[in-house]
Image (tube, coloured by chain):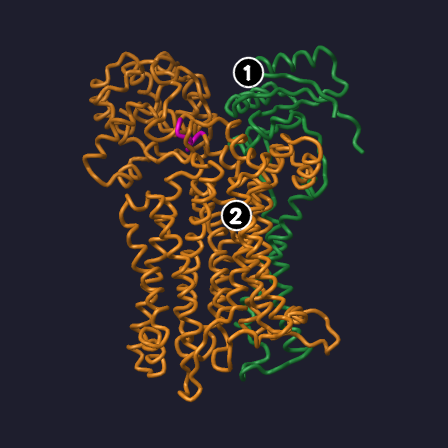
Chain colours: A green, B orange
Amino acid sequence: MKENQEVLFGLYDDETELLEAVKQAKAEHLDIMDVYTPFPVHGLDPILGLEESRLHIAGFIFGALGTLTAFLFMTWVFTRDWPVIFGGKPYWSVPAFIPITFELTVLFAAIGMVVTFYTICGLGPGVTNPVLDERISDDKFCLAFQTNGASNDSINSLKGFLQRTGASEVHQKVI
Amino acid sequence: MSAVVSPIREPLITGNKTYHQITEDLCGPTEKAPNLAWIIAFIISIAFLTFGVFCIAWTIWFGIGSWDLNRTIGWGWDITNFVWWIGIGHAGTLISAILLLFRQKWRTGVNRAAEAMTIFAVLCAALFPGIHVGRAWVVFYFFPYPNTRGPLWPNFNSPLLWDLFAISTYFTVSLLFWYTGLVPDFASVRDRAKGFRKKIYNFVSFGWTGSAKHWQRWESLSLILAGIATPLVLSVHTIVSFDFATSVIPGWHTTIFPPYFVAGAIFSGFAMVLTLMLITRKILNLEDYITIAHIESMNKIILLTGTIVGVAYLTELFIAWYSGYIYEQFAFYNRVFGPYWWSYVGMMSCNVLSPQIFWSKKMRRNIFVTFVMSIFINIGMWFERFVIIATTLARDYLPSSWSWYDPTWVEIGIYLGTMGIFFTLYLLFTRVAPVVAAAEVKSILKTSGDQYAGKNAHSHGHGHGHGHHHETTHKVEYDDTADSAPLSAATPMPETKVEEVTEVVEENTMEKVVEESIGIIDDVEDDLKKIEGIGPKIEGLLKAGGFKTFAALAGADLDAIQKILDDAGPRYRIHDPATWSAQAKMAAEGRWEELQKWQDELDGGKE
């Protein structure tokens, strides 16, 4: 179990206000805990300084694994384990292996990537993550700061920052 | 918001929605008790489902002999229905994957329901090979698993086995894609729910928080899944067509089958999407999200794919004649004039002739016509598969073995049963999940909502008297904008073009949309792109740097502007802002004609 986090967060009504606020927070070198939005806000990642997702690498690796699994398995079955002649074709009839090889490539890539996605995000069936505000999945855009061990002064200045940048509501919560 | 959207494009979300209103409209139906129409439809569906289950049980108990298949006609309604359902299952992934790659925003209104439809249709399809094998209890022999018979492996060279892999993969990938899209919307439902409902939706929403990093990965995942689902969706019906094309039956053994089957699948899939969506939008009051613009877009795809299918039919006939191969020629003669001529007529009239009505814009936008057409196409595509399968088999090489086939009540019952399964699942889906992808619709609201795009758009910046309602500036603006091409494409009539241009510019949407796309809204802003040398990107930089109006730019220090460009990187450093403040001064003072005259002399904003 992670220890409790004290969170100070502001709710914005519009993504453009949020983008401006995040931009400013970065300019003032504030330590942003996270940003929560009801939908993917484009242009947020570079401002937040998020690195590009490397999920596609996982996809490629799993896909390649699928390709190899299918192709090598069929090769083994038809040349080593139980060679059978179908329609006078060679045992190792590569063109006929292509459809299944392709399908398994896609299957492995998709399953692997989805499992990777949920794993690295810490999401999954039955996982309960703390919800800062129930309207974040509706129409509020949330900018959150962690305030564990922060002095009153710094909390107040953060509050001031949130209000200054147009947050319609500012809340503190222990999660 | 990542791209500049033409203001001429029709809005995809009507009714002046806010984000909250979208949540209300889309999550709301899952929270209310079902209405009478839903209950009646559900009871009917369950009745069909029950009868279907009974007929399947009958088939398994008494064997395939309860069908009218015989030694000559080994495939009848079962495989016809199988291919029909698989075809219907193609629209969902096409909409969600291919249209995502093509950045078609209208897909957000229909992708969720279409994907659900795909999954249910593939389930119905998968049923048929399962029971057609006769001994349904050993159907797992299909799968290559280490068994005690050697192990003996299935024949990996057989298209029927490829089919198994293709359909299993397609089903799995579609399900993953669909569910991943559902997770954020389940979170929305969770956050509105109370008590036990909250627990259920908490479970199915996987603990989604909406964190920026999660969204980023979610988008990346969606994009890559779309990328791999695109060849997948094309492969599935290609492989289904291999079931026929790799045989040596005249009329089946043709190389045209893969593209022809894929086009037909998309065609029938869109027809079924339309059938369902037209009913769904009415019952759930989703007219603001599934608009006439959506329906028209789908009708265009129907027209295209229907025509491709038509060309394929004619090509088949031509090649049969041209090949000089009498068995092939007979197979097609038999299709057109043989004992099953009526199914060929049904196929041709429903699939090729009737969709031509959609050349008329009026018809494409008529809901009643669209609904009737979608039913026609569903029927026509069923006939197509019947023509290919039963008609071809009925007259084989030896006239002594020619045969006739009528479905028994068991076969009809199973077909109706799959309808029951399909509609039962779909109706349940409309109760438990937002039928339209709420998060995705929210993400296009600012570019495609009717308050932002289209004729009725209004701008926050409107009414500040920037002076660019002046007639002479219109041309300048459009010449400088990347949108001028789609503009003319969207409005074929020259006189309407002029009208619309004037109207839109007066509505001040162009600036609005561009501002939106850069993510800056301020009450007092000018369209800095009017200054020669400034494009949308630089405008964004300048506005971010504090120069939002012509007046601000007119008074700006040259070094300050140069610094903004330098900071933005090498792509912008090369621009020369020397004349910008002088141009801005003219604009700020409303000296438009003078400005335009000067701009004609300037070369890309440089003297």
Q: Label 2 sits on what residue type?
A: Ala
Compute the Cα span from label 1 to label 2: 49 Å
Which residue bears the numbered disc 2?
B41
SS of the residue at dot 2? Answer: helix
**Magenta highlight on residue B424:** no
Residue at 23% over, 34% down: B497
Q: Nearer the viewer, residue A140 or B129?
A: B129
Q: Residue B265, position in %: x, y? A: 44, 59
Q: Badge 1 local density, few (<14 within 10 Å), some, or many (20+)?
A: some
Q: Label 1 sits on what residue type?
A: Gly
Q: Residue B544, position in %: x, y? A: 46, 21
Q: Residue B598, position in %: x, y? A: 22, 21
* Badges 1 and 2, same chain: no
Q: Quadrant of residue B341?
A: bottom left
Q: Give the quarter of the figure containing the C terminus of chain A.
A: top right
Q: Quadrant of residue A107?
A: bottom right
Q: Residue A3, position in %: x, y? A: 80, 28
For the record, the magenta segment spans B446-451
Residue at 51% over, 31% down: B22
- Vertical placement of residue B57 versus B282, above or below: below
Q: Badge 2 local density, few (<14 within 10 Å), some, or many (20+)?
A: some
Q: Chain of mark 1?
A: A
Please report contact status of discs 1 and 2: CB closer than 8 Å, yes or no.
Answer: no
| Residue B170 visible in the shown view | no
Q: Quadrant of residue A5?
A: top right
Q: Chain of mark 2?
A: B
Q: Which mark is residue A60?
A: none
| Left or right: B442 in relation to A115 | left
Which residue bears the numbered disc 1?
A166
Q: Nearer the viewer, residue A35 or A134?
A: A134
